Amino acid sequence: MTMFSGIQFVEPVERTLDSKFKFRCHKDIGCFNKCCTRVDIILTPYDILRMKKSLRISSEEFLEKYTYTHFDEKSSHPYAMLKMMDDNEGKCPFVTPSGCSIYEDRPATCRYYPLGQGIMISGKETELVKKEFFFFIREPGCLGYNEEKEWTIGTWRVDQGVDFYDDINREWKEIQLRRDAQGQDRLDPKSQALIYMASYDLDRFRRFVFESRLLDIIDTEEVEKIGTDEIALMKFGFKYLKYVLMLENTLKVKEEYTK
């Protein structure tokens, strides 16, 4: 699973955290902002949490205004994709002549560029092997590789803050891959809507948790925390996804509801 869909520009060599490269992007470079047009970006739950907070809008507003839904052909999972502007350039809605208007809260894919990251899972459910890998994205119009600043993939991740994003997003990515590895049936529309809500629509998911009978049925000590901490709520959503997708018994049903 990768977050960047420009496969035609991916260098077909797997890299490690120690792999070196030269790159620098700045306002005076000839291709500045060009990589922010006509690109397909899958957003993660943490991407949306950061972006909607930066814009001071709800997750519902953000999803409606800035995304569209893509259903993966193989897994039938719903993904929120960043919606480009409907203009001749197909620009990102957050790009300006001076750069990204939400730079401090930009998505993980943007932080990684000109690199890409992916996760593969193989083996049986009881003996799953997880492999994280990296690759270079070499778009022909990108001049950043001609700069003299040298990095390793590891130092680039830290500099761009994407290592923290990876830590939070990893569990969500693995949920998609584990379901694929099991070869489960395609999701029906109701399940797709539920998964989409728990993954992306955090404000709506909070209402679902606290206004439905969910907390009457499950036994959890996290109620107070998920009511005030959005990251805790998001991680609770990951537990919920594992439970409803029958990947793990991550939620404990109260004894009176098991009889």
Image: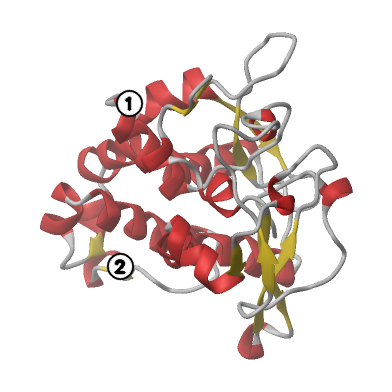
State the residue position of label 2.
253
Q: Picture coordinates of residue 62 (x, y %)?
A: 42, 25
The quarter of the picture where residue 182 lies is bottom right
* Distance from Cα at disc 1 to Cα at disc 2: 37 Å
Residue most extreme to the top: 87
Q: Image point 53% across, 19% down: which residue?
A: 97
Instruction: Name the amino acid, label 1.
Output: Leu
Marks 1,2: beta carbons within 8 A: no
How many marks overall? 2
Q: Is residue 119 visible?
A: no
Please say if 252 is above or below 7: below
In this view of the protein, which residue sits in the foreground, 117 or 190?
Answer: 117
Disc 1 element: helix
Which badge, 1 or 2, is on the more N-terminal residue? Answer: 1
Near mark 1 (Cα within 10 A), the count class, few <14, some 14-19 or many ≥20, is few
Residue most extreme to the bottom: 127
State the residue position of label 1.
55
Q: Image point 74% across, 64% down: which residue?
A: 135
Q: Is residue 196 visible?
A: yes
The quarter of the picture where residue 164 lies is bottom left
